[in-house]
Amino acid sequence: MEKARFISRPNRFTVRCALGSEILDAYLPNPGRLWELLMPDSVLYVVRQKTGENRKLRGMVMAVEREGRPVMLHTHACNDVVAALLQRRMLPGFEELRILQREIPRGGSRFDFLLERNGVPQLLEVKSCTLFGRRIAMFPDAITSRGRRHLMELAELARQGTPAHVLFLVHWPQADFFLPDYHTDFAFASTFLAVSKEVRFHALAVDWRPDMTLGAEIRELEIPWALLKREVQDGGCYLQVFHLPEDGNVALGGSASLPFRKGYYVYVGCASSELSRHLQSVRRKPGRGNSPRGNALDGLKAAAGANMVIPIRTREPLEAELIDALSHIADWTVPSSEMPEDAGNFRLFGFSEHPLHQIDFMNLLLDFRINRLERLLPDIHV
């Protein structure tokens, strides 16, 4: 295994990295977004693969460093780790269960393990968790319809008499709490809550050594159910990111326009209810040949080469805090005072490079989506 420097992610399962003086493409066995981990120049742990006539990817990514610690990225290897811990009776909460079969088909899905205790078969599905802040870990970091289907099918199997477990293996030893990521996948989090009486959820934090062997400590994490029930509601704020590939004028409603420099722009929006439906609307780009409906946001959407939305679901009024935090890290701002009167109350934050590739922006996201929740946990000591 060798250390490499992350350069880019050409597609979901490929990363480009620098290994010494060599640039190579490596297979990334992880479908997650990994925004906060795959930052420019992040350190990757790569295993070289034998070259062959049909092999374009000359390496496989096993892990990435965060704060000097390796974080396992190989999702399939995680199942092997769980299997080894089960066989040695070292998996907390599963010490009395033994493996009957791996990759067991049930209904329309395959589940990772069929276990047995005192003659009673039980199902176990393992999920690899790489999203975390200081003390709280979350899953998933990308929408997973497959993961949600697993929860619903396991709940039905449990109702039919087969005990069902889901284990979230958290690759961050400093985590103390686990939550489903309701910001990213509201449907998964809602299902997580809905089936919590049928499916037994477990979250374990593990520590990886620099040689990618498992550390001795494996800790059970708390799932703060009261906080989860409070926060899983479809309202909150969102950050909308636009990319203007060239300098040019942007229509701001009516006959008004304003010159914009090329770059990335972040807009803060809020919806106290039905946020999911609202986000569908704000993602929609005006059709070709259609003029903006009369506001600055539509003008930006029409001019932008890319448009993405990042939700922050919460019951707290965070708009002012988000605006203040962005004002401290943006390369420039477009305040309301520079807009024509008919543009409305509108403020934009400009970035020369993609915000998702900047550590300050990623830390802002982690703070508002995850670390902020620490103050809502009365028994946490930061």
Image (spheres, rainbow, N blue to C red):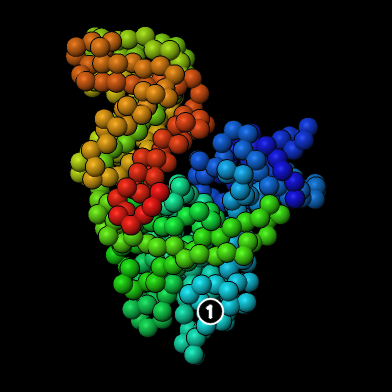
**Residue depicted at x 35% and y 81%:** 160
* Residue hosting label 1: 95
The image position of residue 305, as x and y in percent, is 44, 24
Front-most of residues 136 and 306: 136
User: At numbered mark 1, what does the secondary structure look like: helix, strand or loop?
Assistant: loop
**Amino acid of disc 1:** Glu
Q: Is residue 178 above or below residue 151?
A: above
Which residue occupies 39% across, 40% down? 367
- Against 149, is 107 above or below? below
Looking at the picture, how far across and down is residue 42, in whole percent? 61, 38
Residue at the image point whose x is 41% and y is 68% from the top: 201
The residue positioned 20% from the left and 19% from the top of the image is 344
Q: Is residue 35 visible?
A: yes
Left or right: where does residue 380 sit relative to residue 80?
Answer: left
The residue lying toward the viewer, choosing from 260 and 215, is 215
- Rendered position, 370 above or below 100: above
Q: Residues within 10 Å of mark 1 (few under 14, many from 20)?
A: some
Percent across and percent down for residue 163 are: 41, 79
Report the residue that reaches farthest toward the bottom: 119
Q: Quadrant of residue 281?
A: top left
Front residue of 285/129: it is 129
Q: Is residue 344 left or right of residue 165?
A: left
Q: Visible in this render: residue 244?
A: no
Relative vertical location of residue 266 with respect to residue 182 in this rendering, above or below = above
From the top left corner, tell me how far across and down residue 301 is, in percent.
35, 25
